[in-house]
Image: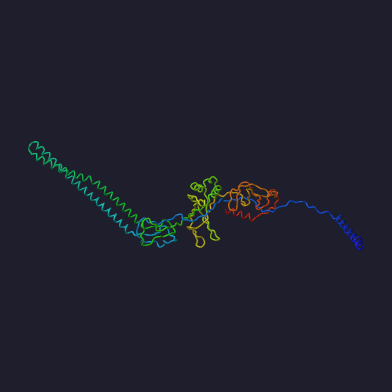
Protein backbone atom coordinates (compact mmCIF):
# COMPACT_ATOMS: atom_id res chain seq x y z
CA UNK A 1 0.00 0.00 0.00
CA UNK A 2 2.85 2.29 0.83
CA UNK A 3 4.76 1.39 -2.40
CA UNK A 4 1.77 2.21 -4.58
CA UNK A 5 1.25 5.46 -2.74
CA UNK A 6 4.91 6.48 -3.40
CA UNK A 7 4.68 5.56 -7.05
CA UNK A 8 1.45 7.54 -7.64
CA UNK A 9 2.08 10.59 -5.53
CA UNK A 10 5.88 10.99 -5.59
CA UNK A 11 7.72 9.14 -8.37
CA UNK A 12 5.36 9.78 -11.27
CA UNK A 13 4.95 13.50 -10.59
CA UNK A 14 8.74 13.97 -10.34
CA UNK A 15 9.27 12.06 -13.59
CA UNK A 16 6.57 14.13 -15.29
CA UNK A 17 8.17 17.36 -14.11
CA UNK A 18 11.64 16.20 -15.39
CA UNK A 19 10.20 15.24 -18.76
CA UNK A 20 8.50 18.59 -19.03
CA UNK A 21 11.64 20.48 -18.22
CA UNK A 22 13.62 18.43 -20.80
CA UNK A 23 10.93 18.99 -23.41
CA UNK A 24 11.03 22.70 -22.73
CA UNK A 25 14.82 22.88 -23.03
CA UNK A 26 14.81 20.97 -26.29
CA UNK A 27 12.03 23.10 -27.67
CA UNK A 28 13.64 26.38 -26.72
CA UNK A 29 17.33 25.48 -27.58
CA UNK A 30 18.71 27.12 -30.75
CA UNK A 31 19.73 24.76 -33.57
CA UNK A 32 23.52 23.81 -33.77
CA UNK A 33 25.75 25.92 -35.94
CA UNK A 34 26.59 24.32 -39.31
CA UNK A 35 30.23 24.40 -40.50
CA UNK A 36 30.98 24.72 -44.18
CA UNK A 37 33.33 22.03 -45.60
CA UNK A 38 36.81 23.45 -46.51
CA UNK A 39 39.64 21.80 -48.59
CA UNK A 40 42.58 20.55 -46.55
CA UNK A 41 46.07 22.00 -47.35
CA UNK A 42 49.30 19.99 -47.18
CA UNK A 43 52.50 21.77 -46.14
CA UNK A 44 55.47 21.04 -48.44
CA UNK A 45 59.04 22.27 -48.75
CA UNK A 46 59.90 23.96 -52.04
CA UNK A 47 62.77 25.66 -53.86
CA UNK A 48 62.50 28.22 -56.62
CA UNK A 49 64.36 27.31 -59.81
CA UNK A 50 67.21 29.46 -61.04
CA UNK A 51 69.78 29.20 -63.83
CA UNK A 52 73.36 28.32 -62.98
CA UNK A 53 76.50 27.16 -64.79
CA UNK A 54 77.73 23.68 -63.90
CA UNK A 55 80.86 21.99 -65.27
CA UNK A 56 80.46 18.29 -66.14
CA UNK A 57 82.91 16.23 -64.13
CA UNK A 58 84.13 12.69 -63.76
CA UNK A 59 86.39 11.35 -61.03
CA UNK A 60 88.81 8.49 -60.69
CA UNK A 61 91.58 7.30 -58.44
CA UNK A 62 95.16 6.30 -59.04
CA UNK A 63 98.74 6.27 -57.83
CA UNK A 64 101.33 8.97 -58.44
CA UNK A 65 104.35 8.02 -60.57
CA UNK A 66 107.22 10.12 -61.93
CA UNK A 67 106.80 11.24 -65.53
CA UNK A 68 110.51 10.58 -66.14
CA UNK A 69 112.87 8.07 -64.59
CA UNK A 70 116.61 7.67 -65.08
CA UNK A 71 118.39 4.32 -64.78
CA UNK A 72 122.11 4.74 -64.31
CA UNK A 73 123.20 1.86 -66.57
CA UNK A 74 126.91 1.24 -67.11
CA UNK A 75 127.87 1.40 -70.80
CA UNK A 76 131.40 0.18 -70.09
CA UNK A 77 132.81 -2.10 -67.46
CA UNK A 78 135.25 -1.12 -64.77
CA UNK A 79 136.00 -0.75 -61.10
CA UNK A 80 134.02 1.97 -59.32
CA UNK A 81 136.43 4.52 -57.88
CA UNK A 82 133.93 7.26 -56.92
CA UNK A 83 130.29 7.34 -55.79
CA UNK A 84 128.48 10.61 -55.09
CA UNK A 85 128.00 10.81 -51.31
CA UNK A 86 124.46 12.12 -51.91
CA UNK A 87 123.55 9.08 -53.98
CA UNK A 88 121.35 7.63 -51.24
CA UNK A 89 117.69 6.70 -51.35
CA UNK A 90 115.37 9.68 -50.96
CA UNK A 91 117.98 12.35 -51.68
CA UNK A 92 117.32 14.90 -54.44
CA UNK A 93 120.19 15.57 -56.84
CA UNK A 94 120.43 18.46 -59.33
CA UNK A 95 120.78 18.09 -63.08
CA UNK A 96 124.38 17.45 -64.13
CA UNK A 97 125.39 15.84 -60.84
CA UNK A 98 128.10 13.16 -61.15
CA UNK A 99 126.63 9.91 -59.83
CA UNK A 100 129.69 7.68 -60.05
CA UNK A 101 133.02 7.30 -61.85
CA UNK A 102 134.79 4.15 -63.01
CA UNK A 103 138.54 3.61 -63.19
CA UNK A 104 139.88 5.27 -66.35
CA UNK A 105 143.24 3.47 -66.56
CA UNK A 106 142.23 0.90 -69.19
CA UNK A 107 140.60 3.51 -71.39
CA UNK A 108 143.56 5.90 -71.10
CA UNK A 109 145.85 3.10 -72.26
CA UNK A 110 143.53 2.36 -75.17
CA UNK A 111 143.70 6.00 -76.21
CA UNK A 112 147.52 5.96 -76.01
CA UNK A 113 147.65 2.75 -78.06
CA UNK A 114 145.36 4.19 -80.73
CA UNK A 115 147.47 7.37 -80.95
CA UNK A 116 150.65 5.30 -81.26
CA UNK A 117 149.13 3.22 -84.06
CA UNK A 118 148.12 6.37 -85.89
CA UNK A 119 151.63 7.84 -85.62
CA UNK A 120 153.21 4.57 -86.81
CA UNK A 121 150.93 4.46 -89.84
CA UNK A 122 151.64 8.09 -90.62
CA UNK A 123 155.36 7.29 -90.48
CA UNK A 124 154.82 4.50 -92.99
CA UNK A 125 153.03 6.97 -95.24
CA UNK A 126 156.02 9.29 -95.05
CA UNK A 127 158.27 6.35 -95.84
CA UNK A 128 156.21 5.57 -98.91
CA UNK A 129 156.51 9.18 -100.07
CA UNK A 130 160.34 9.05 -99.80
CA UNK A 131 160.40 5.67 -101.50
CA UNK A 132 158.33 7.05 -104.36
CA UNK A 133 160.78 9.91 -104.87
CA UNK A 134 163.74 7.55 -104.81
CA UNK A 135 162.19 5.10 -107.24
CA UNK A 136 161.20 7.90 -109.60
CA UNK A 137 164.83 9.09 -109.69
CA UNK A 138 166.06 5.54 -110.19
CA UNK A 139 163.57 5.06 -113.01
CA UNK A 140 164.93 8.13 -114.80
CA UNK A 141 168.48 6.77 -114.57
CA UNK A 142 167.47 3.32 -115.69
CA UNK A 143 165.56 4.79 -118.63
CA UNK A 144 168.74 6.61 -119.73
CA UNK A 145 170.66 3.37 -119.39
CA UNK A 146 167.99 1.59 -121.41
CA UNK A 147 168.32 4.21 -124.14
CA UNK A 148 172.08 3.56 -124.27
CA UNK A 149 171.56 -0.19 -124.35
CA UNK A 150 169.03 0.19 -127.15
CA UNK A 151 171.47 2.28 -129.23
CA UNK A 152 174.28 -0.21 -128.61
CA UNK A 153 172.00 -3.06 -129.69
CA UNK A 154 171.14 -1.20 -132.88
CA UNK A 155 174.83 -0.69 -133.74
CA UNK A 156 175.61 -4.32 -133.04
CA UNK A 157 172.80 -5.47 -135.29
CA UNK A 158 174.13 -3.20 -138.08
CA UNK A 159 177.62 -4.55 -137.70
CA UNK A 160 176.32 -8.10 -137.61
CA UNK A 161 174.44 -7.51 -140.81
CA UNK A 162 177.73 -6.31 -142.38
CA UNK A 163 179.53 -9.37 -141.09
CA UNK A 164 181.76 -7.35 -138.81
CA UNK A 165 180.67 -8.95 -135.48
CA UNK A 166 179.84 -12.46 -134.57
CA UNK A 167 176.53 -13.95 -133.54
CA UNK A 168 177.67 -14.25 -129.94
CA UNK A 169 178.39 -10.52 -129.79
CA UNK A 170 174.87 -9.83 -131.08
CA UNK A 171 173.36 -12.18 -128.50
CA UNK A 172 175.33 -10.49 -125.72
CA UNK A 173 174.03 -7.07 -126.79
CA UNK A 174 170.47 -8.34 -126.90
CA UNK A 175 170.79 -9.96 -123.46
CA UNK A 176 172.19 -6.74 -121.99
CA UNK A 177 169.30 -4.78 -123.50
CA UNK A 178 166.68 -7.18 -122.12
CA UNK A 179 168.24 -7.06 -118.65
CA UNK A 180 168.04 -3.28 -118.70
CA UNK A 181 164.38 -3.36 -119.78
CA UNK A 182 163.71 -5.76 -116.90
CA UNK A 183 165.17 -3.24 -114.44
CA UNK A 184 162.97 -0.47 -115.83
CA UNK A 185 159.85 -2.62 -115.64
CA UNK A 186 160.65 -3.61 -112.04
CA UNK A 187 160.95 0.03 -110.98
CA UNK A 188 157.74 0.92 -112.84
CA UNK A 189 155.87 -1.94 -111.12
CA UNK A 190 157.08 -0.71 -107.74
CA UNK A 191 155.86 2.79 -108.49
CA UNK A 192 152.48 1.43 -109.65
CA UNK A 193 152.01 -0.35 -106.28
CA UNK A 194 152.71 2.77 -104.20
CA UNK A 195 149.19 4.34 -104.55
CA UNK A 196 147.60 1.09 -103.36
CA UNK A 197 150.01 0.86 -100.45
CA UNK A 198 149.31 4.47 -99.59
CA UNK A 199 145.54 3.80 -99.68
CA UNK A 200 145.97 0.78 -97.38
CA UNK A 201 147.83 2.93 -94.89
CA UNK A 202 145.16 5.62 -95.07
CA UNK A 203 142.48 3.04 -94.34
CA UNK A 204 144.55 1.75 -91.47
CA UNK A 205 144.71 5.28 -90.08
CA UNK A 206 140.92 5.49 -90.36
CA UNK A 207 140.62 2.25 -88.35
CA UNK A 208 143.00 3.51 -85.68
CA UNK A 209 141.15 6.85 -85.63
CA UNK A 210 137.87 5.00 -85.02
CA UNK A 211 139.58 3.06 -82.23
CA UNK A 212 140.75 6.36 -80.77
CA UNK A 213 137.25 7.84 -80.90
CA UNK A 214 135.79 4.70 -79.32
CA UNK A 215 138.38 4.77 -76.56
CA UNK A 216 137.73 8.48 -75.99
CA UNK A 217 133.98 7.88 -75.88
CA UNK A 218 134.42 4.98 -73.47
CA UNK A 219 136.57 7.22 -71.31
CA UNK A 220 133.70 9.71 -71.14
CA UNK A 221 131.32 6.86 -70.33
CA UNK A 222 133.26 6.04 -67.21
CA UNK A 223 131.48 9.00 -65.58
CA UNK A 224 127.70 8.76 -65.14
CA UNK A 225 125.92 12.10 -64.79
CA UNK A 226 122.29 12.93 -64.08
CA UNK A 227 120.52 14.56 -67.07
CA UNK A 228 117.74 16.16 -64.97
CA UNK A 229 116.93 16.92 -61.36
CA UNK A 230 115.72 13.74 -59.73
CA UNK A 231 115.15 11.93 -56.47
CA UNK A 232 117.09 8.75 -55.73
CA UNK A 233 114.79 5.72 -55.73
CA UNK A 234 117.34 2.91 -55.37
CA UNK A 235 121.12 2.40 -55.28
CA UNK A 236 123.07 -0.81 -55.92
CA UNK A 237 126.72 0.24 -56.25
CA UNK A 238 129.69 0.83 -53.95
CA UNK A 239 133.25 2.08 -54.28
CA UNK A 240 135.60 -0.72 -55.28
CA UNK A 241 132.87 -2.79 -56.89
CA UNK A 242 133.34 -4.01 -60.46
CA UNK A 243 130.49 -2.72 -62.58
CA UNK A 244 129.66 -4.81 -65.64
CA UNK A 245 128.39 -3.23 -68.85
CA UNK A 246 124.60 -3.05 -68.90
CA UNK A 247 124.21 -3.27 -65.13
CA UNK A 248 121.95 -0.73 -63.39
CA UNK A 249 123.74 1.05 -60.56
CA UNK A 250 120.91 3.38 -59.48
CA UNK A 251 117.38 4.48 -60.33
CA UNK A 252 116.27 8.10 -59.96
CA UNK A 253 112.81 9.63 -60.41
CA UNK A 254 112.42 13.04 -62.00
CA UNK A 255 110.86 15.72 -59.81
CA UNK A 256 109.83 18.20 -62.51
CA UNK A 257 106.64 16.37 -63.47
CA UNK A 258 104.43 13.64 -62.03
CA UNK A 259 101.94 11.35 -63.73
CA UNK A 260 98.75 9.81 -62.41
CA UNK A 261 96.93 7.04 -64.20
CA UNK A 262 93.43 7.67 -62.92
CA UNK A 263 91.15 4.65 -63.26
CA UNK A 264 87.70 5.76 -64.45
CA UNK A 265 84.85 3.44 -65.31
CA UNK A 266 84.05 3.22 -68.99
CA UNK A 267 80.37 3.93 -68.28
CA UNK A 268 81.21 7.08 -66.33
CA UNK A 269 83.58 8.21 -69.07
CA UNK A 270 80.94 7.62 -71.72
CA UNK A 271 78.39 9.66 -69.76
CA UNK A 272 80.98 12.38 -69.26
CA UNK A 273 81.69 12.53 -73.00
CA UNK A 274 78.00 12.56 -73.84
CA UNK A 275 77.67 15.62 -71.65
CA UNK A 276 80.87 17.36 -72.75
CA UNK A 277 80.64 16.45 -76.44
CA UNK A 278 77.92 14.03 -77.52
CA UNK A 279 79.62 13.01 -80.76
CA UNK A 280 82.69 11.90 -78.81
CA UNK A 281 80.86 9.34 -76.69
CA UNK A 282 81.10 6.62 -79.31
CA UNK A 283 84.88 6.56 -78.86
CA UNK A 284 84.65 5.79 -75.14
CA UNK A 285 86.12 2.29 -75.48
CA UNK A 286 88.83 3.11 -78.05
CA UNK A 287 91.95 4.46 -76.28
CA UNK A 288 93.52 5.86 -79.46
CA UNK A 289 90.47 7.83 -80.56
CA UNK A 290 89.63 8.70 -76.95
CA UNK A 291 92.96 10.49 -76.53
CA UNK A 292 92.23 12.74 -79.49
CA UNK A 293 88.68 13.40 -78.25
CA UNK A 294 89.91 14.42 -74.81
CA UNK A 295 92.63 16.64 -76.27
CA UNK A 296 90.11 18.38 -78.51
CA UNK A 297 87.81 19.02 -75.54
CA UNK A 298 90.48 21.07 -73.74
CA UNK A 299 89.49 19.55 -70.41
CA UNK A 300 90.44 20.87 -67.03
CA UNK A 301 91.96 18.47 -64.52
CA UNK A 302 92.95 18.52 -60.88
CA UNK A 303 94.45 16.14 -58.34
CA UNK A 304 93.24 15.94 -54.76
CA UNK A 305 94.68 14.23 -51.71
CA UNK A 306 93.05 14.16 -48.29
CA UNK A 307 95.28 15.01 -45.33
CA UNK A 308 92.97 14.55 -42.39
CA UNK A 309 90.57 17.46 -42.41
CA UNK A 310 92.43 19.23 -45.21
CA UNK A 311 92.42 18.49 -48.94
CA UNK A 312 95.49 19.45 -50.97
CA UNK A 313 94.92 20.19 -54.66
CA UNK A 314 97.25 20.28 -57.67
CA UNK A 315 96.31 21.49 -61.12
CA UNK A 316 96.90 18.90 -63.84
CA UNK A 317 96.55 18.39 -67.57
CA UNK A 318 95.16 15.46 -69.56
CA UNK A 319 98.00 13.86 -71.52
CA UNK A 320 96.76 10.56 -72.94
CA UNK A 321 94.70 7.44 -72.44
CA UNK A 322 96.08 4.10 -71.31
CA UNK A 323 96.47 1.49 -74.03
CA UNK A 324 94.21 -1.08 -72.37
CA UNK A 325 91.09 -1.38 -70.25
CA UNK A 326 91.48 -3.15 -66.93
CA UNK A 327 89.66 -6.44 -67.31
CA UNK A 328 89.16 -6.91 -63.56
CA UNK A 329 87.62 -3.53 -62.79
CA UNK A 330 86.39 -2.50 -66.23
CA UNK A 331 88.07 0.90 -65.83
CA UNK A 332 89.95 3.01 -68.32
CA UNK A 333 93.23 4.65 -67.38
CA UNK A 334 93.37 8.40 -68.03
CA UNK A 335 96.94 9.63 -67.61
CA UNK A 336 97.26 13.11 -66.12
CA UNK A 337 100.41 15.17 -65.73
CA UNK A 338 101.26 17.62 -62.94
CA UNK A 339 104.18 19.98 -63.59
CA UNK A 340 104.13 21.38 -60.04
CA UNK A 341 104.82 18.12 -58.24
CA UNK A 342 107.56 19.58 -56.03
CA UNK A 343 107.26 23.32 -56.56
CA UNK A 344 105.34 25.04 -53.80
CA UNK A 345 105.90 22.19 -51.34
CA UNK A 346 106.07 23.31 -47.74
CA UNK A 347 107.17 20.99 -44.92
CA UNK A 348 104.30 20.33 -42.54
CA UNK A 349 101.77 22.15 -44.71
CA UNK A 350 101.90 21.06 -48.35
CA UNK A 351 103.72 17.86 -49.23
CA UNK A 352 105.31 17.21 -52.63
CA UNK A 353 103.44 14.96 -55.02
CA UNK A 354 105.66 11.91 -54.68
CA UNK A 355 105.61 8.41 -56.09
CA UNK A 356 103.10 6.02 -54.58
CA UNK A 357 100.59 8.57 -53.26
CA UNK A 358 96.97 7.50 -53.67
CA UNK A 359 95.03 10.48 -55.03
CA UNK A 360 91.70 11.42 -56.54
CA UNK A 361 91.65 12.85 -60.05
CA UNK A 362 88.88 15.04 -61.44
CA UNK A 363 88.24 15.89 -65.08
CA UNK A 364 86.00 18.83 -65.91
CA UNK A 365 84.55 20.02 -69.20
CA UNK A 366 83.09 23.31 -70.41
CA UNK A 367 80.30 24.47 -68.03
CA UNK A 368 76.70 24.11 -69.16
CA UNK A 369 73.82 26.42 -68.20
CA UNK A 370 70.77 24.85 -66.63
CA UNK A 371 68.46 24.70 -63.64
CA UNK A 372 69.83 22.89 -60.61
CA UNK A 373 67.54 20.68 -58.52
CA UNK A 374 68.15 17.87 -56.04
CA UNK A 375 68.45 14.60 -57.90
CA UNK A 376 66.07 13.05 -55.34
CA UNK A 377 63.31 15.44 -56.47
CA UNK A 378 62.96 13.48 -59.71
CA UNK A 379 60.71 10.46 -59.26
CA UNK A 380 60.05 8.13 -62.17
CA UNK A 381 61.13 10.81 -64.61
CA UNK A 382 58.69 13.37 -63.18
CA UNK A 383 59.08 16.46 -61.11
CA UNK A 384 56.46 17.87 -58.67
CA UNK A 385 55.92 21.60 -58.60
CA UNK A 386 53.43 24.10 -57.17
CA UNK A 387 51.34 25.90 -59.77
CA UNK A 388 49.99 29.43 -59.61
CA UNK A 389 46.95 28.23 -57.59
CA UNK A 390 49.15 26.53 -55.01
CA UNK A 391 48.19 23.10 -56.26
CA UNK A 392 50.34 20.12 -57.02
CA UNK A 393 51.33 19.58 -60.66
CA UNK A 394 53.64 17.10 -62.36
CA UNK A 395 56.02 17.61 -65.25
CA UNK A 396 58.20 15.12 -67.09
CA UNK A 397 61.89 16.04 -67.23
CA UNK A 398 65.08 14.51 -68.56
CA UNK A 399 68.23 15.60 -66.71
CA UNK A 400 71.04 16.77 -68.96
CA UNK A 401 73.53 16.10 -66.20
CA UNK A 402 73.33 14.18 -62.93
CA UNK A 403 76.30 14.81 -60.71
CA UNK A 404 76.63 13.92 -57.04
CA UNK A 405 73.48 15.21 -55.31
CA UNK A 406 72.32 17.57 -58.03
CA UNK A 407 70.64 17.26 -61.39
CA UNK A 408 70.88 19.87 -64.14
CA UNK A 409 67.80 20.42 -66.31
CA UNK A 410 68.31 22.33 -69.56
CA UNK A 411 64.86 21.85 -71.12
CA UNK A 412 61.31 21.92 -69.82
CA UNK A 413 61.72 24.14 -66.74
CA UNK A 414 61.53 27.90 -66.34
CA UNK A 415 63.17 30.09 -63.77
CA UNK A 416 61.04 30.87 -60.74
CA UNK A 417 59.12 27.56 -60.74
CA UNK A 418 58.41 26.20 -57.26
CA UNK A 419 59.76 22.67 -57.12
CA UNK A 420 58.49 20.34 -54.38
CA UNK A 421 61.36 18.70 -52.50
CA UNK A 422 59.30 17.02 -49.77
CA UNK A 423 58.23 13.39 -49.81
CA UNK A 424 54.48 13.37 -50.47
CA UNK A 425 52.29 10.36 -49.89
CA UNK A 426 49.94 10.00 -51.56
CA UNK A 427 50.77 12.12 -54.62
CA UNK A 428 47.50 13.51 -55.97
CA UNK A 429 47.78 16.00 -58.82
CA UNK A 430 45.72 19.09 -58.06
CA UNK A 431 45.90 18.72 -54.27
CA UNK A 432 46.13 21.99 -52.37
CA UNK A 433 49.58 22.72 -50.97
CA UNK A 434 51.04 25.04 -48.40
CA UNK A 435 54.51 25.80 -49.88
CA UNK A 436 57.35 26.58 -47.47
CA UNK A 437 60.60 27.93 -48.90
CA UNK A 438 63.63 25.74 -48.04
CA UNK A 439 66.33 28.41 -48.12
CA UNK A 440 68.97 26.18 -46.59
CA UNK A 441 68.59 23.53 -49.29
CA UNK A 442 68.66 26.15 -52.03
CA UNK A 443 71.85 27.66 -50.63
CA UNK A 444 73.44 24.22 -50.47
CA UNK A 445 72.47 23.47 -54.06
CA UNK A 446 73.93 26.78 -55.18
CA UNK A 447 77.20 26.02 -53.41
CA UNK A 448 77.40 22.54 -54.89
CA UNK A 449 76.67 23.88 -58.35
CA UNK A 450 79.46 26.43 -58.06
CA UNK A 451 81.82 23.79 -56.74
CA UNK A 452 81.06 21.65 -59.77
Q: Work out which quarter of the rendered image holds the N terminus and state it.
A: bottom right
- Where is residue 384 drawn, in percent x and y? 66, 49
- Where is residue 411 drawn, in percent x and y? 61, 46
**Camera-nearest residue between 377 and 438:** 377
The residue most toward the front is 1
Would you place residue 35 above or below residue 86 in this image?
Answer: above
Total marks placed:
0
Lateral position of residue 91 relative to residue 169, left or right: right
**Camera-nearest residue between 434 and 154:** 434
- Where is residue 242 drawn, in percent x and y? 35, 60
Lateral position of residue 226 relative to residue 316, left or right: left
**Camera-nearest residue between 414 and 239:** 239
**Whether residue 207 is visible:** yes
**Whether residue 342 is visible:** no
The residue most toward the left is 164
Lateral position of residue 443 relative to residue 17, left or right: left
The residue most toward the top is 162
Lateral position of residue 4 relative to residue 257, left or right: right
Please name the colour scheme applied to the rendered image: rainbow
Q: Quadrant of residue 43?
A: bottom right
- Where is residue 336 drawn, in percent x and y? 49, 53
Amino acid sequence: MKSGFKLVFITLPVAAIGAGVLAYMVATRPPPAQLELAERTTPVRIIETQMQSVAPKVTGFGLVAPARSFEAIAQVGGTVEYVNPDLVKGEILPAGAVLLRLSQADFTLAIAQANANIRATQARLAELAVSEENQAAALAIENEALALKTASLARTETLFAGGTVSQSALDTARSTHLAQRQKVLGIQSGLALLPTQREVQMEQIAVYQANLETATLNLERTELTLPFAARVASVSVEVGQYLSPGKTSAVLDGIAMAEIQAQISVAAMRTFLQTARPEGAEFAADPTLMTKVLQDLDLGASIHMSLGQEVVTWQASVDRISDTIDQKTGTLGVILQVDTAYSGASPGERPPLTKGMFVEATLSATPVNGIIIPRTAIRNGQLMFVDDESRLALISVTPFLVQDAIAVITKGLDEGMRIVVSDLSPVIPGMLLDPIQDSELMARLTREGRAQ
